Image (cartoon, rainbow, N blue to C red):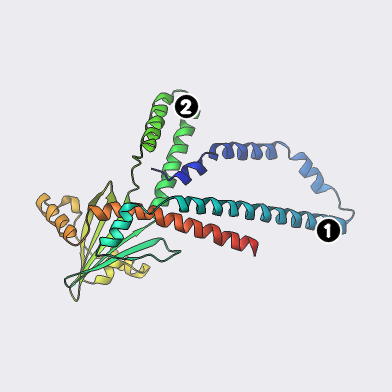
């Protein structure tokens, strides 16, 4: 599902598209005045230069001022939302009671959780880029569906309306489904390589997609493009879904014992929302500071 801010900002898309289309058509339909002026000789190049320079300077100044005011308005709005909203209970409980240590560097998309378990080092990495990509994909699908229905005479408008009403009811009841988030879990032992588990945190569950093994622990992290390229040439193991079911269950229990649990699956999507909000506010302030400089 989409965040409230994303939904609010997606509403005027259709109007903007129509306005842009009309503007392009008007420019194409009336080229004669531009063509005539291009052939007319300039009698005073000094006058033309002075006029255009002052005009653009004034326009730039006005746009900068309006943009700065708008950015300030957004900053004030987001600040008021921050004061009202409290940190989700799932986030507070996890940070206070979990054995994982959180590493969240401002300005970076990736978030890392690390812990020790016996002689093992366990790292769980996720990214707020999943949230942005998920929302953009949903908006694109909604726009495409709306355009198809508008252009097609046989479009099932009633079905679309029923779907919209169902989504509105879910949002009003507070049953908005969390965004699915990809997890990269690495379990490594000194001198023994590492296990690399690719999983999905969704609906309070951790769903394992791949369970790999690398003799070189560096390949499991893929910190650089070179290491990631080398890892592609190594056979890490078969797809998780092709394994014996009992083996799959035991591997899932193996992860749960190391803290990759339902509590983690609930925490990560909620923390993604918190971090995305923080990064958005920081972005607004940085852009305003640049405009005002």
Instruction: In the displayed orientation, state which residue is furthest to the bottom.
Output: 191
Taking the image as shown, residue 253 lies to the left or right of residue 8, namely left
Rendered position, 289 above or below 67: below
> Is disc 1 surrounded by few (<14), some (14 to 19) or many (20+) residues within 10 Å?
few
Q: Which residue is mark 2?
A: 152
* Quarter placement of the N terminus: top left
> Is disc 2 surrounded by few (<14), some (14 to 19) or many (20+) residues within 10 Å?
few
What distance separates the C-alpha of mark 2 from that of mark 1?
52 Å
Instruction: In the displayed orientation, state which residue is furthest to the right.
Output: 43
* Quarter placement of the C terminus: bottom right
Between disc 2 and disc 1, whose residue precedes?
Answer: 1
Residue at screen point 32% across, 49% down: 180
Rendered position, 199 above or below 233: above
Residue 20, horizontal then vertical, whole percent: 61, 40
- Report helix, strand or loop for mark 2: loop
- Report helix, strand or loop for mark 1: helix
| Front position in the image: 163 or 66 | 66
Q: Which label belongs to residue 50?
A: 1
Q: Are marks 2 and 1 in contact (CB under 8 Å)?
A: no
2 or 1: mark nearer the eye: 1
| Front position in the image: 154 or 279 | 279
């Amino acid at each position: 599902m989409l965040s409230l801010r994303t939904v609010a900002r997606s509403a005027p898309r259709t109007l903007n598209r129509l306005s842009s289309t009309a503007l392009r058509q008007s420019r194409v339909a009336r080229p004669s005045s531009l063509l005539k002026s291009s052939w007319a000789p300039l009698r005073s190049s000094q006058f033309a230069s002075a006029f255009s320079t002052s005009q653009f300077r004034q326009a730039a100044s006005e746009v900068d001022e309006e943009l700065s005011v708008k950015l300030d308005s957004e900053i004030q709005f987001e600040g008021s939302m921050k004061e009202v909203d409290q940190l989700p209970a799932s986030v507070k409980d996890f940070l206070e009671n979990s054995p994982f240590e959180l590493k969240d560097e401002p300005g970076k998309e990736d978030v890392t959780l690390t812990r020790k378990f016996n002689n093992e080092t366990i790292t769980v990495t996720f990214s707020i880029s999943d949230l942005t990509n998920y929302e953009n994909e949903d908006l694109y699908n909604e726009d495409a569906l709306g355009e198809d229905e508008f252009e097609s005479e046989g479009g099932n408008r009633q079905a679309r309306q029923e779907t919209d009403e169902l989504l509105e009811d879910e949002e009003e009841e507070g049953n908005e489904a969390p965004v699915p988030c990809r997890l990269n879990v690495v379990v490594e032992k000194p001198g023994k390589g590492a296990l690399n588990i690719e999983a999905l945190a969704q609906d309070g569950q951790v769903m394992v997609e791949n369970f790999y093994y690398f003799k070189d622990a560096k390949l499991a992290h893929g910190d650089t493009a070179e290491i990631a390229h080398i890892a592609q040439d190594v056979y890490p193991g078969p797809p998780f879904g092709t394994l014996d079911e009992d083996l799959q269950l035991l591997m899932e229990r193996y992860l749960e014992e190391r803290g990759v649990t339902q509590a983690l699956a609930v925490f990560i999507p909620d923390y993604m929302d918190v971090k995305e909000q923080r990064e958005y506010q920081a972005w607004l302030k940085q852009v305003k500071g640049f405009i005002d400089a």
